[in-house]
Each structure stands twice: as structure tokens, then as C-alpha cells.
């Protein structure tokens, strides 16, 4: 029987959560921005060595002054994916704040931090030093682009491996 | 605007009524009382002769004068034309007409037996509940609701057909009466039912809304919302509604608000960068002019006896001065724009304190330095608070210092030191950040402060960081330069003017 693991995508709006899921699960990317209302759950099976794993990826609406993430959505998570927009340095703090809230509810689960929109290098403003610090603190820091697919599978695989170990 | 109450509210009301009544029937009428649709036990109330388009107020005269009902709905006592027994008639205004629900009021005896039944035989009670609610199927489905009832075992029983997109295990819609286990439902519903159990197993009536979610239905996405209800008689209901117009409206507003915030941020960044470029260009244009003016003045003195040369030199001088004054004008306008756009203080009372900013930034970055094993030394000149104030804005001053320190840290190795020092230099405060790293390669020195100058190996954020520092410091009338340190290392020297005790025509507040 395959093991099911729930992952929550966390981050403020328009950082690329929905695009990353769509890239990972369906292999597609769209330039169009469509606000996610509430929740969408996608599933993808992954094979890690002899372990078959079903990932239930919860794409939550981006939290900001317009919309809040419900605590009940976070329950039962085995892993978290924080998404920040590398071209908007101010997306980092809200993601970390969401993680603190999630960890209070679900305990210390593995967390990947995706610095997304890597293809927009020229507008990159997020400080590498800060990302390094977070990597040192145990987060799986990965540069990704939902547009090109770079780093996306690696990030999910990293998290899946950590969740199996846990 | 929508005139109907939330559909789930309406459904709850219908269900509540139905659990206490029997022989439920429903009609959907237009505002003039003409029949649009009907369902349930019509024959029990002698309404089975009604046809679409008929005037229903002939069969139900108590409706005359009550159409359309007020938004909170209307309850009318009546007598059933079929059984002659007392009847409850409930009216609600919907978007597409007026819903009329007819229920025969249950006798106390009926109620008693139903209660006894539910105490003794849960299975039978479920069947009875289903029987009572089945006449509502059409009305509920007409409201766009999918309704499931929770049985005593925690499984769900479809009251209206349960579409396949509510189930992760079924390829077809489940017919009314079909049982679905929790695991057969989609992951979101499965999760929500975990929360719903608290309502369903509690004493008394209760309700819980799921919040919106999205299910994939083939190529189509359905936006949904669920509600768990416990009716006063103990019936446990799960309603699933597709989100309606108001909901979509809400999303569109949200979308527009977010899109405009993104656009605003993007434009602001773009403007900042363009302003910066403009400033740099104009500033650079000014540089050679000083030399040109100097040389021309000298020529003017030397050739004072040669009338033709004097005239030519004077022409050159005049043009160069005009050029200089134009550039100054542009720069003045530019600083005024920057000032209004970003705001910084030249007022001694409110100008930021450079020493305090340095101390704060050093404190914030200390952990990062410690982590890398690099010492961070802060050497403030013993400036008194008044002497360490500089023209600028406290937040951005800290960002400048942070950028310089992070840059220094990035290029330092374990056991090296980074020094942050402040010094009083008459009308300016001088801040230096010095590291013992490999230093800036000579071929890089020229492009150091350019956007993505990729000053030293690594580049990345550093390129933008120094660009920002220069931009900010220049806009405050200060300067920033790089100096090489022997035997190796880099020193960045920031000079910021002190605010003068004279501001926008206001008299000085202190000497
Ligand atoms: N260039 C680029 N754009 C991206 C990337 N990821 C997302 N986007 C765009 O950013 C916008 C917001 O993405 P979305 O996935 O809806 O963000 P969410 O609100 O976090 O779910 C959309 O216009 C996407 O096309 C990426 O890696 N590169
Ligand atoms: Mg989204």
C-alpha cells in the first residue's frame, strides 16, 4: 500500500504556489494570474527507491490583508513548502510567519523554501545571505522557476525524502 | 444584485421544516404566481393538476398578495386541499423566482414515534429521515445543492445524486440512496468531514462551513463550498454548493486588488530604477564640466590680450556655464521628486541618527557574522547624538548599512574582521565599512556601483545592493566610494551631509 503524505504550499499571493503545483503535477505553466480562492488539492505519486508515495499537495490561497489561511487546512501536514518570489524580497517574511503558525499546529515537520521565478534573474532582489541563513537553520532552500521547471522536481523530491525519514 | 439568501441557509431551513413535517411539496413561481417548476408530494395537496405557466394562486389562494415575499421569507398557515389537515406554507424569494414549500404539520404523536424510533433503531430512523426528505430532492437540486446525510456509522448517504467529482473513487455519479464512505470522497471533503464530526456528534443543532475549495471535473474546475449541519432533530447533513455569483464577484474583487498591488509595486520599482539611472547620467554629465570650465577660465586669463581668442573662450565659458546651470536644475528637480516620492529628512529634529542606525544594523547582523566566524567591530566616533544626525531616512539608511555589511560579510572568511566606523568630518558624517577579504579586482572597480556590476565573484544581490546604496546616498546629497585596502580588503566610504538648521523657510530651532 502506498503511503499518503500531505504537503501544504504556503506563501503570500502571486509568488507562484499554484504555478509550481501545476508544473510539478501536470507539467504545465501559464502566464495568466488567477487568484486561488480557498484550497485546491492535487495528487502525484512518486517513487523513492522502494517506497511508493502519494503526495497530496494542498495549494492554499495566498495570505495577505485580503484573505487568511485557515488553521484547519494546515492540520495533518507532513511537510511544508514555503514559496517566495525572488523578485519581491518582501515575500519572505510572510512565508516564514505562516510556517511558524503551521509548526505550532502540526509540530516540527520538514520544510522546503522555494525562491521562485528564477527565470527573472535580472529583477532578483532576495538576499542570498538570508537564504543561506535559513538553509543553515535546516530548511531545504531551492531556487526554482515554475516557468522553466528548473529546480521544481528537486524541491518536491527533497521534501518527500525528508518526510519518509520522519 | 442577488435577492436570494445564501442557498445553504435556505436549504437548512427547508430540511429543518421537512424533518418536522411530512408530505412535503414545493413550487417555484414567478413574481406573478405562474408556475415555473414543481416537485415533491404534489398529489397529497391536490396540486398534481397544475401545469407549467398556470396561475398557482388559484390553487393556493393564500398566496394572493404575498408575492414576492420579503427577503426574510414568509410563513403562512393553511389547510391542505388534499388531506384537509393543517399545512405550513413557507415562501422564499430566490434569484429565479419564488420558492413555495408546503408541509403538513406533524402531529405530536408522529413526532413522538419518530423520536422513539431514532432512540431504538438508528437504521430505521435513517430510512425514515430519508423518506421524509426525499420530496425535497428536487428543491434542493434546484438550488444547485448536493446533499448527503450522515448515517449512524459515519458513512454518507446521497439524498440528491452525488456527482463523480465529489468522489475520488467513483467514475460515475452516485444515485440517491447510495452510500459513500469517507475515504471514497475527495481529499478535501475527507479532511472537512474530520472537522464536521465535531458538529455531528455534539448535542443540539450546529453548523460548520468549509470555506471555499476547488475540485477538478475533467477539464473544468468547480469552485465549491460545503456546510455540515446538525438539525434540531439530530439529522446530520452535508451540503455541497457550487459557489454563486456573489462569490465569484468576491473573487474578482480580490483578484483586481491583488493585481493592482502587484502592478503598483512593479511600477514603483521601475520608476525608482529609471529615476536612479537618470540621476546617474545627469550626475556623470556634470563631472567633465568642472574641468572644462576650469580650463576655459585659465585660457581666458592667459589670453586676455588676444581679443579673438578671448571672444571664443568667452563663448565657450558662457555655454559651459549654461550647461552647468541646466544640469543643476535637472538635478534639483530630481531631488525634489525623490524627496516627495520617498521622503527624507533634512530637518535636524527629525533627521536619522547615523550612530544609532549603525548600532541597530550591527545588532541585527551579529548572528550572521557569528555564524560565519567573522568578527564585526563597530567603531563609532564619540559623536554626541546631535552631531551624528545626517540627511536621509532612517529605514533606508539602515538598508544602506545592511547592504554594505552583508556585502563585506559575503567576501570575508572565518577569523577575518569587518569594521564599521563613524567619523565626524565637519559638515559631513563619514561612515566606513572595511573588510579583509580578497578585495575588488581592478577591472571590476569601474562598474562596482552599476546595476549588476557583479563587483566581485558571486555578484547576484551584491550588484543590486551597491547600486541601491549609491542611488540612495546620492539622492540625499551624499557620496559613496570604494577604496582598496592593503594588503587585501575593500573599504566603502559613505559621506552624508549633516542636516542644516534651516529647512523650507522655517527658522532654526536650535543653534
Ligand atoms: N516568470 C515567472 N513567472 C511565474 C513563475 N511562477 C509563477 N509565475 C507567475 O506569477 C503569477 C502568480 O503565480 P501563481 O502561481 O498564481 O501564484 P500564487 O498566488 O502563489 O498561487 C502568474 O502570473 C504566474 O504566471 C516563474 O517561475 N517565473
Ligand atoms: Mg494560487
Image (cartoon, rainbow, N blue to C red):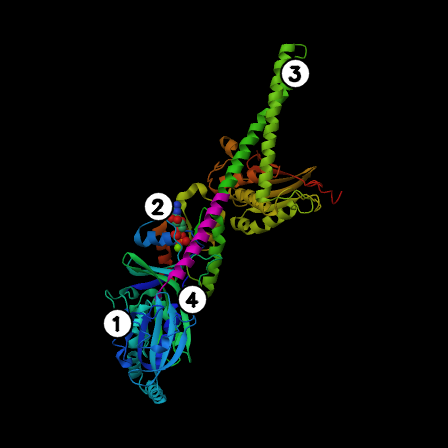
Cβ–Cβ under 8 Å for marks 4 and 2: no
Is ligand 1 closer than 8 angstroms to the Cβ of mark 2? yes
What quarter of the picture does the C terminus of chain A occupy?
Answer: bottom left
Secondary structure of residue under mark 1: loop
Name the front one of labels 1 and 2: 1
* Discs 4 and 3 lie in a common subunit: no
How far apart, in angstroms, are the residues tagged by discs 3 and 2? 64 Å
Q: Which label sits on residue A72?
A: 4
* Discs 1 and 2 lie in a common subunit: no
- N-terminal label among 1 and 3: 1
Cβ–Cβ under 8 Å for marks 1 and 3: no
Q: Which residue is label 3 attached to?
A: B300
Which region shows up in magenta? B241-268
Residue A56, position in %: x, y? 34, 61
How far apart, in angstroms, are the residues tagged by discs 4 and 2? 33 Å
How far apart, in angstroms, are the residues tagged by discs 1 and 2? 60 Å
Secondary structure of residue under mark 2: loop
Q: Which residue is label 2 attached to?
A: A148
Q: Nearer the viewer, residue A117 or B282?
A: B282
Name the front one of labels 4 and 1: 1
Q: Which residue is label 1 attached to?
A: B51
Where residue B419 sits, quadrant-wise, is: top right
Amino acid at each position: 500500500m502506498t503511503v499518503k503524505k500531505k504537503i501544504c504550499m504556503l506563501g503570500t499571493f502571486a509568488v507562484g504556489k499554484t504555478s509550481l503545483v501545476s508544473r510539478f503535477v501536470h507539467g504545465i505553466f501559464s502566464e495568466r494570474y488567477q487568484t486561488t480562492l480557498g484550497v485546491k488539492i492535487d495528487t502525484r505519486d512518486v517513487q523513492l527507491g522502494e517506497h511508493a508515495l502519494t503526495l497530496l499537495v494542498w495549494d492554499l490561497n495566498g495570505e495577505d490583508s485580503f484573505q487568511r489561511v485557515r488553521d484547519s487546512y494546515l492540520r495533518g501536514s507532513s511537510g511544508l513548502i514555503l514559496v517566495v518570489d525572488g523578485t519581491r524580497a518582501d515575500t519572505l517574511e510572510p512565508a516564514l510567519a505562516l510556517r511558524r503558525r503551521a509548526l505550532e499546529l502540526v509540530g516540527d515537520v520538514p520544510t522546503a523554501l522555494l525562491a521562485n521565478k528564477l527565470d527573472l534573474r535580472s529583477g532578483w532582489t532576495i538576499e542570498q545571505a538570508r537564504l543561506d541563513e535559513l538553509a543553515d537553520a535546516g530548511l531545504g532552500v531551492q531556487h526554482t522557476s515554475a516557468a522553466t521547471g528548473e529546480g521544481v522536481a528537486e524541491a518536491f523530491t527533497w521534501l518527500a525524502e525528508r518526510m519518509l525519514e520522519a | 444584485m442577488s435577492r436570494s439568501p445564501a442557498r445553504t441557509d435556505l436549504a437548512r431551513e427547508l430540511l429543518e421544516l421537512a424533518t418536522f413535517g411530512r408530505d412535503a411539496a414545493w413550487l417555484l413561481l414567478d413574481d406573478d404566481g405562474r408556475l415555473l417548476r414543481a416537485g415533491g408530494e404534489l398529489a397529497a395537496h391536490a396540486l398534481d393538476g397544475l401545469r407549467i405557466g398556470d396561475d398557482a394562486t388559484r390553487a393556493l389562494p393564500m398566496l394572493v398578495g404575498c408575492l414576492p415575499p420579503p427577503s426574510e421569507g414568509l410563513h403562512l398557515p393553511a389547510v391542505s386541499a388534499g388531506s384537509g389537515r393543517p399545512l405550513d406554507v413557507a415562501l422564499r424569494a430566490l434569484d429565479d423566482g419564488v420558492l413555495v414549500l408546503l408541509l403538513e404539520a406533524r402531529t405530536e404523536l408522529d413526532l413522538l414515534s419518530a423520536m422513539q424510533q431514532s432512540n431504538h433503531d438508528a437504521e430505521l430512523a435513517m430510512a425514515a429521515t430519508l423518506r421524509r426528505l426525499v420530496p425535497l430532492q428536487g428543491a434542493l437540486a434546484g438550488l444547485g445543492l448536493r446533499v448527503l446525510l450522515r448515517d449512524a456509522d459515519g458513512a454518507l448517504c446521497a439524498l440528491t445524486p452525488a456527482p463523480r467529482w465529489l468522489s475520488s473513487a467513483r467514475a460515475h455519479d452516485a444515485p440517491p440512496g447510495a452510500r459513500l464512505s469517507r475515504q471514497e470522497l475527495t481529499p478535501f471533503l475527507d479532511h472537512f468531514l474530520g472537522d464536521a464530526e465535531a458538529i455531528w456528534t455534539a448535542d443540539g443543532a450546529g453548523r460548520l462551513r468549509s470555506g471555499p475549495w476547488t475540485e477538478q471535473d475533467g477539464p473544468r474546475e468547480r469552485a465549491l463550498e460545503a456546510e455540515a449541519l446538525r438539525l434540531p432533530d439530530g439529522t446530520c447533513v452535508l451540503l455541497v454548493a457550487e459557489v454563486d455569483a456573489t462569490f465569484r464577484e468576491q473573487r474578482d474583487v480580490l483578484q483586481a486588488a491583488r493585481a493592482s498591488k502587484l502592478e503598483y509595486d512593479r511600477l514603483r520599482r521601475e520608476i525608482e530604477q529609471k529615476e536612479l539611472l537618470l540621476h546617474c547620467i545627469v550626475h556623470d554629465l556634470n563631472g567633465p564640466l568642472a574641468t572644462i570650465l576650469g580650463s576655459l577660465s585659465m585660457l581666458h586669463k592667459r589670453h586676455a590680450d588676444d581679443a579673438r581668442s578671448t571672444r571664443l573662450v568667452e563663448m565657450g565659458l558662457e555655454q559651459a556655464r549654461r550647461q552647468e546651470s541646466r544640469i543643476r536644475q535637472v538635478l534639483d528637480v530630481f531631488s525634489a521628486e525623490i524627496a516627495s516620492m520617498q521622503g527624507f529628512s533634512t530637518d535636524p529634529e527629525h533627521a536619522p541618527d547615523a550612530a544609532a542606525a549603525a548600532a541597530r544594523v550591527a545588532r541585527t547582523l551579529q548572528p550572521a557574522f557569528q555564524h560565519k566566524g567573522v568578527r564585526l567591530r563597530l567603531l563609532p566616533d564619540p559623536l554626541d547624538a546631535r552631531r551624528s544626525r545626517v540627511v536621509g531616512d532612517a529605514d533606508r539608511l539602515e538598508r544602506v548599512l545592511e547592504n554594505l555589511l552583508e556585502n563585506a560579510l559575503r567576501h570575508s572568511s572565518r577569523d577575518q574582521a569587518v569594521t564599521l566606523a563613524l567619523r565626524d568630518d565637519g559638515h559631513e558624517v563619514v561612515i566606513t565599512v572595511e573588510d579583509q577579504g580578497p578585495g575588488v579586482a581592478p577591472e571590476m572597480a569601474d562598474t562596482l556601483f552599476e546595476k549588476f556590476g557583479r563587483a566581485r565573484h558571486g555578484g547576484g544581490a551584491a550588484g543590486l545592493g551597491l547600486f541601491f546604496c549609491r542611488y540612495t546616498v546620492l539622492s540625499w546629497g551624499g557620496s559613496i566610494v570604494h577604496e582598496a585596502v592593503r594588503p587585501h580588503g575593500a573599504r566603502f566610504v559613505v559621506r552624508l551631509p549633516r542636516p542644516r538648521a534651516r529647512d523650507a523657510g522655517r527658522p532654526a530651532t536650535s543653534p
